[in-house]
Amino acid sequence: MKTYKNIGLLDLRRATDEQLAQISRIEAIGTLIVGDSQMDALSRIRRTAIGTTIQIPSDAELILQNGECHINASRINGFKSKTFFIINGVAIFDETVTVEDLDKISRLMINGRLIMPESLLGALGAKVQINGDTVALKAGEQYKEDVFHLNDINLFGMANGSKLVVDQLQALEDFDHELFSEKITEIRVLEEVVTTHANLKIIAKSISNYLQAEKFVVPDGYAFYDSLTLDEMKLKTLNSRNLFIKGQLTIDTDSGLILEKISGIICDTIEINQSQYETLKPILVKVTNINWKDHGDTMNMTHLLISDYYLNQVDSVSFTNYGKLVFDTTVTRELFEAKVTRIENYGVVSCPQDLYAHVLKRVIKNFGKVKVHEEEAYSPDSEDENVISGLGFLEF
């Protein structure tokens, strides 16, 4: 018998009845694809932790793509049968695709973003399952992904009278106002505008959804960052004494060094030790939120193994985990309860079975996975001879 586990996408459509009969267990599968006549056989297989199960006719064409998938009329007309798309990234339908062309498409599953002409919105809506967002382009609009920097270099390369759709519009540099008026007639901003006050007065009338778009106005003399961690190395590379941080600023160095290099800080959130806050308060021009750093906090970005020896060396400890945090079998429930105060998890936390409930009690934020050690979590049935595991994609 066989077990299939830890596979991103498992396609069983072409598996024979004999092959299906040899499968005893399917576990931890991101997407499971089966044929329309296999559901009965599948019901006899033990299944756990299946993200999505998709039923597709065995003769349908399946297209899997990670990243950008460009779809035009020529590509669709080349399909020999109904086609099923699974796209992890961005699906882009261009203006050559008509509503009639969509008859060749059975279904689309998109983990990411769908970009298409507005004319296809209704017809595609019935065929799409999307975990993400949709951008419908009006006639003549061009989509520019991520950040569009408004400067002369980018304007030179544009056709006169362009209509843009952008995620983020950054207008922090000086630019030729006459050239801007010639090249751009309209900008639709999906997320936010980051600009100086002077530039905002020039571009505001060209932003079609000006009132709806979030705006960040950076004062003159301030350097802009989406987010920033201030440590000794970063302080050496700063080219401005004034900082505007749209997101979070994390303080990871001595307050005295910061005061030598920086005169003003504007940010949404600052993560800082309480002892540093009063020292740096004179340069905090505007701060919306404050996150106090825990003196005993350990930030893990890679693989960290915690044993009883480590815990016995500290009074108490908390963890902010972005990697893999593993508590080994030497850590008892009593020791864990006494020493570990908090876990904020953005990665993977693994522990012995008898520690699992205690770990969960200490997890205050979990955007990742908390699990029992692999060898304890699953023991194959005695008849299982083969385990097929750790694959991105498997097709029979």
Image (tube, rainbow, N blue to C red):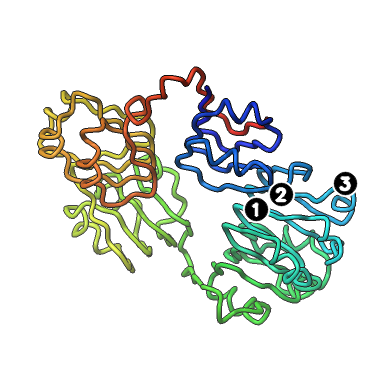
Q: CA distance from mark 1 to mark 2?
A: 6 Å
Q: Which disc, if any, is residue 299?
A: none
> Mark 1 = which residue?
109
Q: Which numbered mark, 3 or 1, is in the foreground of this view?
A: 3
Q: Residues within 10 Å of mark 3 (few under 14, many from 20)?
A: few
Dividing the picture into quadrants, the one containing residue 116 is bottom right
Residue at 26% x, 41% y: name it. 319
Determine the secondary structure under disc 2.
strand
Rendered location of residue 330, percent (x, y): 19, 23
Which of the two discs, 1 and 2, labels the residue nearer the N terminus? 2
Q: Residue at x 83, y 64 (%)?
A: 95
Instruction: Mark 3 vs mark 2: give the one in front.
Output: 3
Question: Is 227 on the left-hand or right-hand side of 20?
Answer: left
Give amino acid for label 1.
Met
Distance of mark 3 from mark 2, alpha carbons?
14 Å
Residue 342 against residue 116 in the figure, above or below = above
Residue in the picture at 43% in, 62% down: 244
Q: Which mark is residue 85?
A: 2
Contact, CB < 8 Å: mark 3 with mark 2?
A: no
Q: Which mark is residue 80?
A: 3
Dots 1 and 2: beta carbons under 8 Å? yes
Residue 119 in picture, x, y percent from top left: 78, 72
Which comes before the other along the chain, label 3 or label 1?
3
Instruction: Measure the C-alpha gap from mark 3 to mark 1.
Output: 20 Å
Amino acid type of the residue that numbered disc 2 sits on in the rendered structure: Phe
* Circle 2 Cα neighbour tier, 10 Å, few/some/many (<14 / 14–19 / ≥20): some
Classify mark 1: helix, strand or loop: strand
